Amino acid sequence: MNVISEKLTNDILPIIVIYKLSIRDSLAWQSLNTDYSYFSSVLIYDNSPVSQPIPDTRFKVYYLHDHHNSGVSKAYNEGLKMADSLGKKWLLLLDQDTQLPNDIIASYAQSIYQYPEENFFAPILNDKIGIVSPFSYSYGITHRLNAVKKGVLSLSKYRAVNSCSLIRTQAMKLAGGFDERLPLDHSDIYFQEKLALNRSSFVVVNACIKHRFSGTEVSNKNDTLIRFEIFCKSCITMSMLTQFESNFRKVSLKRALNLSLRFFTIRFIVLHLQLWNKR
């Protein structure tokens, strides 16, 4: 690791959001503990019903347990408070099942050196279908990209998912952090909406990471219904925050139709109609 990368690790607070998973079994934890044990501190935000012990490691671990499962927005805001109190310049957002390549910090460091005025850096994330992040975004509608160029992209046309994004602490404070009315879905889109008010661009770093995207992962019907309810409610919240009600209603209905076909049931469509009618 070069001097620039080593200095950057001292300025970063990684935050891993855990849910119903042992810390030891988290790919993000394993990555940090194996390849990046020179981090001075890491925050574990555990949304699981029951708290768990912290595994032995070389770095300082801050552990916050939230049995209410408040979601990632609450977790990231707590991470911001922690980073600010520790004097960290950057916050690295990590899903529990994100496996970091061993050269990712060097990629961030190179991009920061090349674009020192930027506040938000994100790698390319791939799921089993293709590129999941960055993605195009316009008036509530998202589309996958077939190819992504490294370098600066406009937040007026593109967004990135939360996982593996590196955000300057001061920029996150200036944007007011994440909106906790969006505990999971669309939290990244709306946060970047606020981030763009101060700087309307972000950087795609030279790194590709495998990502498990909930929209393409098949689960059992009952779990998927619970997950869809969260998604549908976030669409309703976004319709109020952005004034794009018709578009977010279409996004919710499209997800309901796809899931109804996948599981051969109309329960997703019924749930969509119930939630939108009582909003």
Image: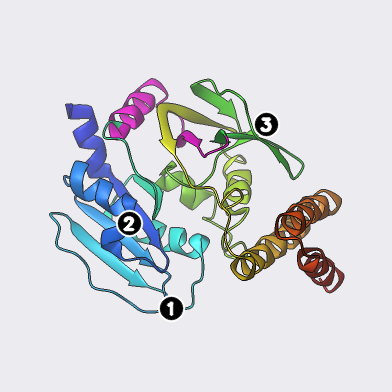
Crowding at dot 1, Cα within 10 Å, few <14 / some 14-19 / many 20+, comes out as few
Q: Position of residue 207 (x, y in %)?
A: 40, 29
Q: Which residues are magenta?
A: 104-129
First in residue order: circle 1 vs circle 3: 1
Q: Is residue 275 magenta?
A: no
First in residue order: circle 2 vs circle 3: 2
Figure quadrant of the N terminus: top left
From mark 1 to mark 3, how far is it between C-alphas? 37 Å
What residue is at 54 percent from the left and 48 percent from the top? 213
Q: Position of residue 81 (x, y in %)?
A: 38, 61
From mark 2 to mark 1, how far is it between C-alphas? 18 Å
In the rendered image, which residue does mark 1 sit on? 67
134 relative position to 66: left or right: right
Q: Which mark is residue 113?
A: none
In the rendered image, which residue does mark 2 sit on? 26
Q: Which amino acid lies under the numbered mark 3 shown in the image of this protein?
A: Lys
104 relative position to 279: left or right: left
Q: Nearer the viewer, mark 2 or mark 3?
A: 2
Quarter where residue 270 is shown: bottom right
Q: Is 87 above or below relative to 21?
A: above
In the rendered image, which residue does mark 3 sit on? 157
Mark 1 in CB contact with mark 3 (< 8 angstroms): no
Element assignment for label 2: loop
Q: Which amino acid lies under the numbered mark 1 shown in the image of this protein?
A: His
What residue is at 30 percent from the left and 59 percent from the top? 25
Q: Which amino acid lies under the numbered mark 2 shown in the image of this protein?
A: Ser
